Image (cartoon, rainbow, N blue to C red):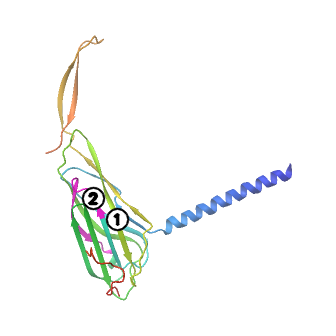
Amino acid sequence: MPDMNKKLISCCLFIVIQCIAGQACADYIINNATFVLIEPLRISAQPNQTFSADINVRNISNLCAFQFDIIFDPQVLTITNATPGDYITSSSRSILASEAVITSGKLTVAVITKDDADGPSGNGKLATIQCTINNLPGNGLKYTETTLNLDNVLMADRLGDQLSAHSLRDASVIIKLSDETTPVHIKMKGDLRFGQIIKDIYIRQPSVNFVNTKLFGYDCLN
């Protein structure tokens, strides 16, 4: 019986050690993974309202060039502008070329820098975009939702070698439609305890690139 208890205790200790090691490994991976994300991750807006969002990178090393697409629903919103952030030039490199191309439902942003110095490492802002919510019909709804999707993210170091993004995070846009109401009075009949009841039902009403050029191997990165 004592031997069995010792084996049970040893087994439990082994499982605990494995769990701790596994958690430590997972924490290391998460803390050192490279993320590209749109922030804020959740945006609130109204029809005809303009808002901005940042495209940020986390845990990057020697960033000298990048390109990304943002896919959006052109029936819901319009991207009106995109500007590169100052992070990519924070290590004394200068911008060789930058371009933002907006087509129906897609924005492509690309930036390439030049110099002998390495690019920045750590966390920073790649770009800022401005969006305007279209004049949407309410269709009886109080809220609707759309998404800004990151796609085709490319990043390169000073030698033109690819830098991987381990995770991409999109942003949700919650659109509050007009809460102005038009009352519709319906007279309800029946043998009710308190007699005849008038009930108001409110119907919601609305208020009035380098697109074809690969970054990797670009001969002016250095």
Rendered view: 196 above or below 206: above
Residue at 66% over, 60% down: 18
Disc on res. 72: 2
* Quadrant of the rendered image containing residue 111: bottom left
Magenta-drawn segment: 70-86
Q: CA distance from mark 1 to mark 2?
A: 11 Å
Against 71, residue 44 (above or below) is above
Query: In terms of secondary structure, where does tag 1 sit?
Result: strand
Label 1 belongs to which residue?
151
Quadrant of the drawing holding the C terminus = bottom left
| Residue 162 placement (x, y as % from top left) | 41, 77
Residue furthest to the left? 208
Residue at x-position 25% and y-position 41%:
142
Position in image of residue 58 (x %, y %): 42, 68
Q: Residue at x 81, y 51 (%)?
A: 5
Find residue 84 and report its image quarter: bottom left
The answer to if 8 sits in the magenta stretch is: no
Query: Which residue type does callout 1 highlight?
Result: Asp
